[in-house]
Amino acid sequence: MNYESTDSSSKEPQLSSAEGNYMLRLTLAALLVVSVSFFGTASANASDKLSVTVYNSDLGVVHEVRDLEFKKGIGQLAFRDVPSRIDPTSVGFRAIAPNAKVNILEQNYQFDLVSPEKLYDRYIDKDIELISNDGKIYSGKLLTYSSGAVTLQDAHGQIQIVRLAEISNTNLPELPDGLITRPTLFWQYSSKFSGKTSCEVSYQTGGINWHAEYVAVLDDDEANINLSGWSSIDNRSGKTYKDATLKLVAGEINRAKQPRTNRLYRAEMMAAAPAMDGGFQEKAFFEYHLYTLPRPSTIANNEIKQLSLFEPASTGVTKEYYFVADRGAKNAEVKLRFINSESAGLGMPLPAGRVRVYNNDSDGSTILIGEDNLGHTPKDEEILLTLGKAFDLVVEETTVARRKITDRVSEVDYVIELRNRKDEDVTIKVDKFLGNYWKITKKTHDFEKKSASKVRFEVKVKAGEEVKLEFTVRLGS
């Protein structure tokens, strides 16, 4: 473990930052002497054990085991290397050893990080020293700062405007109060022993999310697909999780709304629950499904990582055609239907995500034929994917007549013409929404009542033919 003492002998490397077309290097030799001396017991950075559980809702739960050193009595500790998007009110702490009696009394989360702009702003009306590219030294009181120049007043009252493009180094005597080099939890603790011990620390963080991505390849006879699944993890939490045990939760958990809080947090600590431990790649967990990667993985900050969810599986599909009236469409939609069952070749919980469906051309090239979003789908449930509009299936709806029967009852005559320009026979499922009070009094085709307001006609149309679906609806009561 990389354990770092926080006594006054600790050093911090120079801070560098790109600004415009030049490099502004800030010499901060004495910076951390000021910021660390108050927390003179320990500074915890790297984890001996790290577990990250990622949810579909911009949420991650991090569980770490770190070796921390305490002194008997009341002390201070800087817990570094936390994500900038951490929720400090969610932090849990527990010393693992039974004889290690440590309580966290107070926590301050500070994330006002060092930057050239903030340092210049804090040094207004204070003395600084600038060194130009050719070695010339400018020193004096900083009066103003902008992205292009600084204004200095020397000991004789002379004013100098120095262009930052000409500056290679800026020397500052110390780090101003309130600025730190990385997000840090500062703890005040009460310990009944002195020494180093392993501790569990858990917390929630935003800025990390995951979703599933599926690739389905339809075979030549359009009767089967080969389906593979990927998890896409987007980490923008402000921290890299190195060699972590990665867990993904599929499902929708309820999140309580948080009240507005100040930028400085103080919180009483509670013991953290042990990390979830699953021996299988996928398993039911409470009312959700949990996916555990069987090997450590590094999730870098500002990275999208993709990992395979399951081995590719093959399942039978049926191609179906749909037309929803009243939407102004001119073509039927083509959809793929299959069952997520073990007998059909799948039978696994499928997390929500995008499904891209491909088909191979005769020359072997792969062609995208459509994509759709899949909701969280348990095993043995039916899946219907919309791929696009059928080019050769033209449908036109016409309202032929309206008649008023009484003040509260009317009749409407509809004609829906279906034209099949394909070389094969098809069946088109025509859906029509009729409202709350209706009765079909005349029809050329049978229908099925799908809901209180929706009916479906299944119309067979032979290759090259046209079929008219005609029906009369009485509306009102």
Image (cartoon, grey):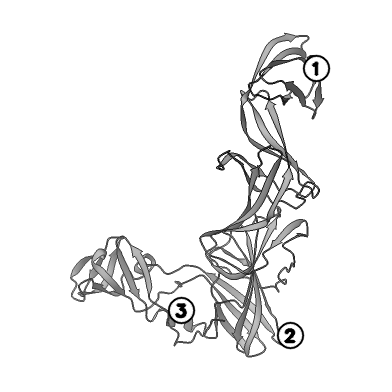
Mark 3 or mark 2, earlier in chain: 3
Q: How far apart are marks 3 and 2 (CA)?
A: 33 Å
- Residue at (79, 50) in percent of width and height: 342
Mark 1 is surrounded, within 10 Å at the Cα level, by few (under 14), some (14 to 19) or many (20 or more) other residues, namely: some
Q: Name the quarter where the C terminus is drawn.
A: top right
- Between 71 and 322, the one lying in front of the other is 322
Tell me which amino acid carries mark 1: Ile
Residue 113 position in % (x across, y down): 45, 68
Position above or below: 258 against 322: below
- Between 385 and 111, the one lying in front of the other is 385
Are discs 3 and 1 less than 8 Å apart at CB?
no
Considering the numbered disc 2 on the image, is that residue within a helix, a strand or a loop? loop
Considering the numbered disc 1 on the image, is that residue within a helix, a strand or a loop? strand
Residue under circle 3? Answer: 35
**Image quadrant assignment for residue 429:** top right
Residue 340 position in % (x across, y down): 76, 46
| Residue 421 appears in the picture as rendered | yes
Residue under circle 2? Answer: 98
Position above or below: 54 against 36: above
Residue 149 appears left or right of 444: left
Considering the numbered disc 3 on the image, is that residue within a helix, a strand or a loop? helix
Residue under circle 1? Answer: 440
Residue 471 position in % (x across, y down): 76, 15
Tell me which amino acid carries mark 3: Ser
